[in-house]
């Protein structure tokens, strides 16, 4: 998602389209089965991205997992995340639990992970 954000800010539409088409071919090839105009294809891609993010975060919440730093540059277009360095599991329920010590405001704390996914979708 961070690369989409960067290319959008740069106004590089050609490279942005190449990146999105690469992601769709790699992560969502079934969307290419019907010949859709690009705007419709991107809407379908976005809908599936949001669904994957929701399923991912719901799974984390079920088991008390905190990714730690779910900002746009750690969010993949395939609906997964990376940069799991500051992750952790809660020993006892604490909605403010955050193993990433550089997140003093708790933007990526346990209970705020759905909002982080929402921000990544809005960025996309």
Image (cartoon, grey):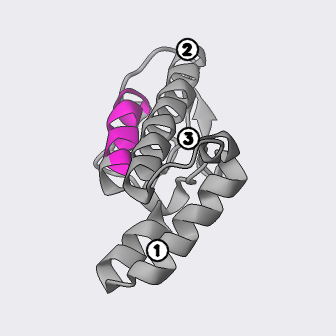
Measured from the top left, where is residue 21 in percent x and y?
58, 63
Q: Which SS class for mark 1?
A: helix
Report the front residue among 54 and 26.
Answer: 26
Between 85 and 13, which is closer to the camera in this rendering? 13
- The mark nearer the N terminus, 1 or 2, is 1
| Residues rendered magenta in the picture | 110-121
Identify the residue at horizontal 59%, vertical 49% (top origin).
Answer: 86
According to the picture, the residue beneath numbered tag 2 turns out to be 62
Position of residue 55 in the picture relative to residue 13 (left or right)? right
Q: Is there any visible trace of residue 80 in the rendered image? A: yes
Q: Is residue 121 left or right of residue 62?
A: left
Q: CA distance from mark 1 to mark 2?
A: 35 Å
Q: Nearer the viewer, residue 44 or 36?
A: 36
Tell which circle, 2 or 3, labels the residue nearer the N-terminal end: 2
Q: Bin the neighbour count of mark 2 within 10 Å (Cα to Cα): few under 14, some 14-19, many 20 and up.
A: few
Dots 1 and 2: beta carbons under 8 Å? no
Q: What whole-number distance in Å separates the C-alpha atoms at marks 1 and 3?
A: 27 Å
Q: Nearer the viewer, residue 48 or 106?
A: 48
Q: Is residue 68 left or right of residue 78?
A: left
Q: Which residue is mark 1?
A: 16
**Residue 83 visible to an observer of this rendering:** no
* Magenta highlight on residue 39: no
Residue under pointer 3: 67
Categorize mark 1 by other alpha carbons within 10 Å: few (<14), some (14-19), many (20+).
some
Residue 74 lies in quadrant: bottom right
Instruction: Classify mark 2: helix, strand or loop.
Output: helix
Kindly report the distance in space between the C-alpha atoms of the residues bearing marks 2 and 3. 13 Å
């Amino acid at each position: 998602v961070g690369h989409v954000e960067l290319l959008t800010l740069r106004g590089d539409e050609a490279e942005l389209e190449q990146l999105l088409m690469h992601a769709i071919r790699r992560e969502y090839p079934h969307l290419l089965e019907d010949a859709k105009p690009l705007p419709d294809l991107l809407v379908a891609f976005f809908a599936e991205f949001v669904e994957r993010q929701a399923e991912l975060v719901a799974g984390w919440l079920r088991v008390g997992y905190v990714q730690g730093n779910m900002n746009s540059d750690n969010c993949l277009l395939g609906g997964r995340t990376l940069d799991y360095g500051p992750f952790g599991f809660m020993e006892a329920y604490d909605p403010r639990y955050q193993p990433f010590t550089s997140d003093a405001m708790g933007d990526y704390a346990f209970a705020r992970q759905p909002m982080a996914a929402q921000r990544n979708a809005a960025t996309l």
